[in-house]
Amino acid sequence: MGGDNIVSGPPGPPITFTEFAIPTPSQPGWLAAGSDDHVWFTHQSTAPPAVTKVSKDGGQFDLFKVPSTRIGPRGMVAGPDGKVWYAKQGGVASVTPDGVVVEYPAPNGGDSAGIALGPDGNLWFTQQLHDRITRVTPDGKFTDFALPNPASGPLAIALGPDKNLWFTENAATGNRIGRITPTGTISEFPIPTPGAGPTGMAAGADGNLWFTEQDGRKIGKLTPDGQITEFGIPSGHRPFRITNGPDGNLWFTATGAANTVGRVTPLGQISEYVVPTAGADPYDIAVGPDQNLWFTELSANKLCRITDLQGGGTAMPTAGTSGGGGELGGDRACMRDRDCPDSGMACGGDLCSSQTKLCVLSVSGDPGACSADGDCWCSQRGATCSGGHCSFTTLAGVP
C-alpha cells in the first residue's frame, strides 16, 4: 500500500443507501447535478451513446441519444447557461433540460476527459492524449493551453477556492497536480508517492484541494500554495473519484473489487462503506440537487443515493499519525460551533464547548456555543441558539 500516514478509527456514522435500477443498459459513468433539479449521467456504453437525466426521487429516467456513435461521453458539469455540459472524445457538448444536444469538436480532435465550470463563466476541460487544458466559451470557441511536460495525461479538473482550475496528471510520467489560472498560467506540484495515478479532484469545504491516488491507494490534500499531505486508505482499496459532501467531509468511490464508497474528514480520517449490490463497481460521485450524495454503479447499471449523512463525530484519529490521537479538536480555542470544523461541517462533528470554549466532539454531550442560530452545526435540523448555547448538538437531534 505504501501509506505511512494512515488516519483510521472506529467506523463512521451510519448512512443510508438507496439504489435505482437504470431502465436502459448504459454502464453509467460520470454524473453531475443539473440546474434543472435533476441528476444527469453519461453512458459509457455506446448502445446507445446517450446521456440521461433522473428526477431527484429516482423515479423518472429520461434518456437523450447523442449524435456521435461509438463514443461514450465522459466528464459532466452544470454549465453557466442552464445546460449540462459533458466531455466526449473529440470535443465537448451541451444538452438542454429537454434534451437538445449540441456538439463542439475540439480544433485538434482532442481526447476530452474531465470538465469544470471556471470562474470566468467558461468551461474548462482536460485533454489526456494531447497534454492540454482547454477553455471553451458557452458559444463553442476554444483556447488550448499546452502543459509544460509531454505524456502528463491530465484527467480530472476542478475549480479551486483560489478561483484557479486544478487538475490531476494521471500518467506515470506525470504524477503531478497542476494549477491553471483563468489567463492560462500553469504551475505543477509533484505528488510525493511515485506512480500515484491521481484520478479525482475536488475542492473541500476546508479551503484545500483533495484528490484520489488510485494506484497509490491514498487520498491527497493540497493547500492552495501547493503543499501536499497524503493519507493511506486503511483497507488498501483504490480510490477513483472524489467530491465535497454537504456534511463538509470528502466522499470518494473505490472501483473494482473493493465495491465501496469512503468518507475522509478534513483531518484525514477515513471510513468506508460497502455498496449493497455486489460487484457494483462504484464510479463517479457528486452532490445532487437534493443535497444528498449520488454515485454511479458502472457494472450494476444502477444509480445510488446516499442519505442520512451525520458528520464525522464518531471518527477518531489514530495515535502517532498526523491526527495526533485522542478526540478531534480538544485543545483549540473557539467562540462558536463553526470555529470547529475538523471532523466535518455537520451536526455530529466537532463543536465549541460552551463551558471551556474549546473544540470537543458533540457526542460528549457538551452544549455548543453560539450567538445566533446559524452558529450551530445542528441548525439545519432545527437547533436554535438560546442563552449562548445550541438547543441540541447530538447526532439524533435530541435536546
Image: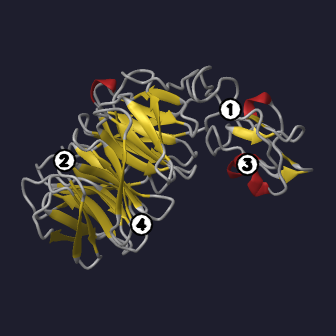
217 relative to 355 in the view: left or right? left
Q: What residue type is labelled 3?
A: Asp
Q: Does residue 370 sit above or below 333 in this rendering?
A: below
Q: What residue type is labelled 2?
A: Gln
Depth check, front residue: 140 or 160: 160
The C terminus - image quarter: top right
Whichever of labels 2 and 1 marks the residue nearer the N terminus, that label is 2
Which residue position is annotated with label 1? 328
- The residue drawn where x is 39% and y is 74% is 121
Q: Which mark is residue 44?
A: 2
How are the residues colored? secondary structure
Whichever of labels 3 and 4 marks the residue nearer the N terminus, that label is 4
Disc 2 or disc 1, which is closer to the eye?
1
Which residue position is annotated with label 4? 35
Q: What residue type is labelled 1?
A: Leu
Q: Which mark is residue 141?
A: none
Question: Disc 2 and disc 1: Cα gap in Å?
Answer: 41 Å
Question: Disc 2 and disc 4: Cα gap in Å?
Answer: 22 Å
- The residue drawn where x is 17% and y is 48% is 151
362 relative to 172 in the view: left or right? right
Depth check, front residue: 205 or 65: 205
Q: Are marks 2 and 4 in contact (CB under 8 Å)?
A: no
Q: Do the residues labelled 1 and 4 touch (CB within 8 Å)?
A: no
